[in-house]
Image (tube, rainbow, N blue to C red):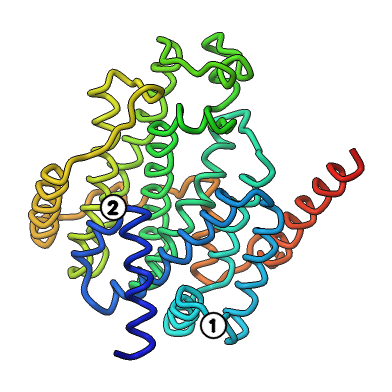
Amino acid sequence: MSNSQEDLDYCENAIKNGSLSFHAASRLLPHAVRNSCLALYAFCRLADDEVDLKEDKSASVYDLVERLDQVYSGKPRNLPMDRAFARMVEETQMPRALPEALIEGLVWDAMERRYNTFDELVAYSARVASAVGVMMCVIMRQRDSNVLARACDLGVAMQLTNIARDIGEDAREGRLYIPLNWMKEFGVNPNSFLKAPAPTPEIRELAHRLLSKAEILYQRSESGIVCLPKAVRPAMFSARHIYAAIGQEIRNNKYDSITLRAKTSRTKKVGLLLLSCAQAGASLMLPGPATRYAQPLEQTKFLVDAAEVKKLDGSDWSERFISILEQLRQRDLEHYRA
């Protein structure tokens, strides 16, 4: 077995343990695309775990940036995920701005940032989820701006679903992603909620609102999926439906994400995979929805520009990324002085 295949096998095992939903959807991808997606998702999983699970989050972020530097210099660390990710970057000419955007979102997590408005939450979702969707489009050799915008919609929808599902789990870890102005509107004190998370009518309604926002974006994302290469459409439709099904389980649980954790059964996943294959087949005969041409979300425009290898506002994205790292260093310095 080649070292390359060993690295991919390692990535696949990591995904099996980290995301059953993604692994189920990925099985429908053609071999060449699937290998690159496995390398991408494994690296993203690694990045998320490094920041989420390690006590010294700042050190984890700095280490991730160094690993990214090594990947893009063609000298990845001698580790399976790094080697596989480096091969994918070279083969697809992946713009560095995209993994940088993901890491910026992880920096926001390391800084324990909260979001005052829904727009701010979408900006976070763009980095930790839409950036991955755009990288998958690059892997599929699809850089049409309209399709990239719809991939961003799907990423935001998935992240909003994750947030709605994990309200209780996040609260018990001291994390809060619900927009603060929404909580104020419903008379929920954020600090009191974190001390004693409970599935109150107000919290249930906030979960409902998150899922309603996500559903609009799930619907709009389909017009981009039908423009992808035929061979990848079943997998992309299945990713869309499997994540949306998590939202449906939350609804079935009466929006209680505190005492219950929504999950889809294996039987349900199989049914959704069959539905996705049928929908992909139908897309070959039906005209694409006009929503394909909808403007990208304001918070995801920079990702679309990056995939088209354009600069944003006359400045290089890497310069903006360096700025966010300086903010993290400043926070660490302030903590040290305190």
Determine whether, in the image, residue 21 is placed left or right of residue 188.
left
Residue lying at the far bottom of the rendered structure: 2
Question: 10 Å neighbourhood of mark 1: few (<14), some, or many (≥20)?
Answer: few
Whether residue 103 is situated above or below residue 222 in the rendered picture? below
Q: Nearer the viewer, residue 213 or 224?
A: 213
Name the residue tied to disc 2.
Answer: 20
Q: Secondary structure at mark 1?
A: loop
Please tell me how many numbered marks the rendered image carries. 2
Determine whether, in the image, residue 304 is placed left or right of residue 286.
right
Question: 10 Å neighbourhood of mark 2: few (<14), some, or many (≥20)?
Answer: some
Q: Position of residue 121 (x, y in %)?
A: 55, 37
Whether residue 280 is situated above or below residue 222 in the rendered picture? below
- Closer to the chain start, of discs 2 and 1, is 2
Whether residue 106 is situated above or below residue 219 in the rendered picture? below
- Residue at image coords 66%, 66%: 63
- Residue at image coords 65%, 76%: 69
Whether residue 116 is situated above or below residue 281 in the rendered picture? above
Tell me whether circle 2 and circle 1 mark residues in contact (CB < 8 Å).
Answer: no
Q: Secondary structure at mark 2?
A: helix
Per the rendering, the mark at residue 78 is 1
Q: CA distance from mark 2 to mark 1?
A: 27 Å
Between label 2 and label 1, give the one nearer the viewer.
1
Q: Position of residue 270 (x, y in %)?
A: 11, 50
Q: Position of residue 225 (x, y in %)?
A: 26, 57
Quarter of the figure with the N terminus: bottom left
Amino acid on which the number 1 mark rests in the picture? Asn
